[in-house]
Amino acid sequence: MGFSYLGGKNWLDVTREERLFCAHLYHDIRSGRREQEFVRWLRDARFWWVKPAPESLNVNQDWEVAYEVCFYRDLLKSRNQSAKLKGFPQKRTFDLCLFSEKCIVIFEAKVHEGFDTEQMSHLTTYGDEQQQDADGDRQMVRALAGGADGPVVLTVALASSKYLEKRHKGSGDVLKADRVDAVTSWKDVHEWARRSVVGYAGIYSTADEKYGS
C-alpha cells in the first residue's frame, strides 16, 4: 500500500515525528498490560550510567504508562492551582512517563535528530549562566510529587542508535550522567517489542532508521 501524493509511500515511511512512535510505544505497553514487563526490561537493560539500575525501578509495584505528559499544568490543575501562577513551565511536556508509587521515569525522545543542550539541561536546571541553581525537572517533579518522601525521579534518553553511536562523548555530551540516568535506542525498544508484542511489525526499527533523514 502507498499513496501517489506521498511518492508511493505510507505516512509511516515519511514521518520523522517522535510523538507518533512514542504513541505506538504507549499503546504497545498499555494495551497488552505490559507495564511491569517493560519496567523489567528497562531495569535489566545495559544502558544505565550507574549499574545496577536504581532499586526504585521495582517491577513488583503497580505501574502506569503515560504519553505526552504535561505534568506541571495538569497536576496543578487537578489541585485547583495554576502552573503559570506557581512559576512552573506550564507547557513542558514529557514524551513518555512511567509512574509508580515509588518512582517516576521520564523519557525524552528523538527520532530524526539528536538532543540539544537546552532541552536536556532543563532536566537539571531552568537557570541561565547567572542562575545556575534554579531547579530543573528532576527537582520540580519530585517536589510536586511529595518532596524528599516522594517518588524517585529517573530520566531516560531515547533516540536512534545511529545518533547514539556517533555523538560526542565527554564533557560536552548533552547526555551526560548528571542529566540522564540511562540512554537507550529505538533499536533496543525494537528488540523488546520483537520478543514481547504479539503481531509486532517492526515500527521501532523504522524509527531507528530515521536519524538524519
Image: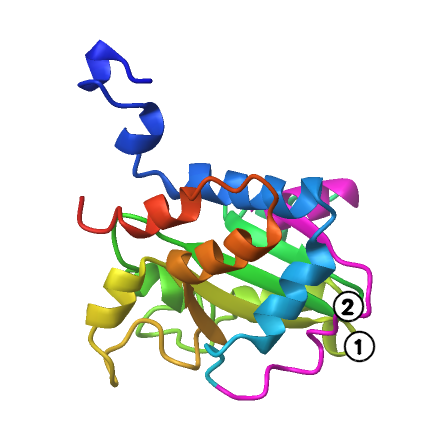
Above or below, 119 against 142 in this view is above
Numbered tag placed on residue 50 in the rendering: none
Q: In x, y percent, where is residue 179?
A: 43, 74
Which residue is painted at 21% across and 11% down in the image? 4
Q: In x, y percent, where is residue 164?
A: 29, 68
According to the picture, the residue beneath numbered tag 1 turns out to be 149
For residue 121, say whether it is visible: yes
Find numbered disc 1 in the image and state the secondary structure of the residue it sits on: helix
Considering every residue shown, the one lying at the far bottom of the view is 51
Q: Are marks 2 and 1 in contact (CB under 8 Å)?
A: yes
Q: Quadrant of residue 158?
A: bottom left
According to the picture, the residue beneath numbered tag 2 turns out to be 146
Which residue is painted at 61% across and 40% down in the image? 27
Q: Quote the CA–CA distance across marks 2 and 1.
A: 6 Å
Answer left or right for 66 relative to 124: right
**Magenta includes 76?**
yes
Which residue is painted at 44% across and 81% down in the image? 178
Answer left or right for 77 relative to 47: right
Above or below, 193 against 171 in this view is above
Which residue is painted at 51% across and 53% down in the image? 194
Q: In x, y percent, where is residue 103?
A: 71, 69
For residue 80, say whether it is visible: no
Find numbered disc 2 in the image and state the secondary structure of the residue it sits on: loop
Quarter of the rendering occupied by the N terminus: top left
Q: Counting other residues with Cα less than 10 Å from the Cα at mark 1, is it few (<14), some (14-19), or many (20 or more)?
A: few
Q: In x, y percent, where is residue 75?
A: 71, 47
Considering every residue shown, the one lying at the far top of the view is 4
Above or below, 149 against 104 in this view is below
Q: Which segment is the magenta one?
A: 50-79
